[in-house]
Image (cartoon, rainbow, N blue to C red):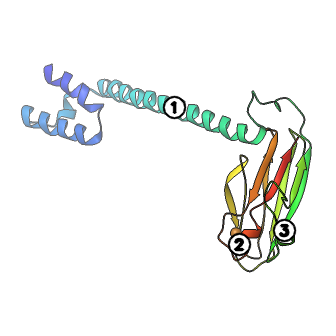
Amino acid sequence: MRLRHVFDREICRDKRSQERANIDLAHDMGEDPISEFSQAELLVLIHICIGGIMMKNKMLAIIVITVAGVLGGGILTLAIGLPSSPCAGTTSVTHSFTIIENLNGYNDSAYHPGSWLTNPWPVMNVRQCEMVVIKIENKDIQTHGFAVDFYATRGTEVQGGQSLTVQFLASKVGQFRVYCIVPCSVHSSMLYGSLDVT
Ligand SMILES: [Cu+2]
């Protein structure tokens, strides 16, 4: 009876433990341990084991769903802004821009020398809570970058001849610098763009 109890517990563990238990029992009893149980008893045992596994899977599923929920919430937050942001519940207007990258900088920014504060170029003016869509077209053969303070600080690289679109909700009012993140040959003229959110 004690041995059966041990076996009851062991059978629910992983396969290796189960095999070990079988071997131990076989050794102790001098026979195949499975034969000690009637078919009905075995069915109950198997059911208990499956139940245990299902419980584990259920818990795992709940954890996975919880994590997915948190991640989903994060992704959604990125797309529509923080729930507590001033844009929550507003219908967003899309404001699109095109930035051409070439040896003249961003939209000929090389011809607009100055600094971000004294002579920013290009300048993108939007209203708070507008959805900003910026298409970046790299017409050069070298890679250029694109970043926006606060909104796209990690920035993105755009390979020569490629184009891509950056999109975000202008939830925060202010003047934000637009700049290149790749040390290209015209880098100094790609550092003083501006996004003005009013
Ligand atoms: Cu650059």
Q: Earlier in the sequence, mark 3 or mark 2?
A: 3
Q: CA distance from mark 2 to mark 1?
A: 40 Å
Residue at 85% in and 29% down: 89
Provide the residue designation for mark 2.
Answer: 159
Query: Callout 3, which amino acid?
Result: Ser
The single residue placed furthest to the bottom in the displayed view is 141
Residue highlighted by disc 3: 109
136 with respect to 33 (left or right):
right
Residue 36 x, y percent position in the rendering: 19, 28
Q: Amino acid at mark 1?
A: Ile
Q: Position of residue 20 (x, y in %)?
A: 18, 39
Give the image quarter of residue 18: top left
Residue 45, image x and y in percent? 32, 26
| Label 2 element class | loop
Residue at the location (82% across, 72% down)? 110
Residue 71, numbered label: none
Q: Is residue 37 visible?
A: no
Which residue is painted at 60% across and 37% down in the image? Answer: 68
Q: Quadrant of ligand 1?
A: bottom right
Q: Relative to 185, is 109 above or below?
A: above
As measured in the structure, the alpha-carbon distance from the residue carrying label 3 to the one carrying label 2 is 19 Å
Tell me if mark 3 has few (under 14), some (14-19) or many (20+) residues whose alpha carbon lies within 10 angstroms of its own.
many
Q: Amino acid at mark 2?
A: Gln
Labels 3, 2: front one:
3
Q: Is residue 188 left or right of residue 60?
A: right
Q: Quadrant of residue 103?
A: bottom right
Foreground of the two, 69 or 56: 69
